[in-house]
Amino acid sequence: MYNRLENGFIRDDYFAGVDEFVNFTKSHPECMDGVMLHCPCNRSKCRNKAFHDEDTVKVHLCKKGFVPNY
């Protein structure tokens, strides 16, 4: 979950983990606002407070990683 990069590139297993996380979240409506998901990325505006569509959450997690201690 936190081991995102290897030699400056996003690890393949990290991509798979992000997909698994999003699918898990979509199966728990308490983590959603309609079709929007809580975004647990380490971006200062998100950090599990903001809601975004599925693709945006995936991009944020790939760019910034998960917020520490998530």
Image: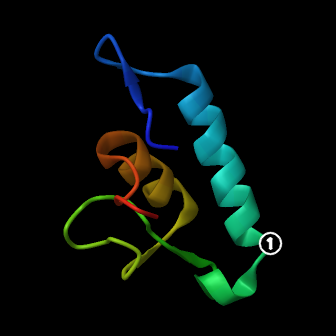
Residue 4 placed where, x, y %? 42, 32
Quick check: 10 above or below 45? above
Q: Quadrant of residue 63?
A: top left
Q: Residue at x 68, y 89 (%)?
A: 30
Residue occupying image coordinates x 44% and y 58%: 56
- Residue flagged by tag 1: what amino acid is it? Ser
In the image, is 44 to the left or to the right of 34? left
Q: Is residue 2 above or below residue 49?
A: above
Residue at the right extreme? Answer: 27
Q: Position of residue 43 (x, y in %)?
A: 24, 61
- Toward the viewer: 2 or 45? 2
Could you tell me which secondary element the residue under label 1 belongs to?
Answer: loop
Identity of the residue furthest to the left in this view: 44
For this rendering, which residue is in front, 34 or 39? 39
Q: Residue furthest front?
A: 69
Rendered location of residue 16, percent (x, y):
65, 35
- Residue depicted at x 42% and y 49%: 61
- Residue depicted at x 51% and y 68%: 53
Mark 1 sits on what residue?
27
Residue 22 location, quadrant: bottom right
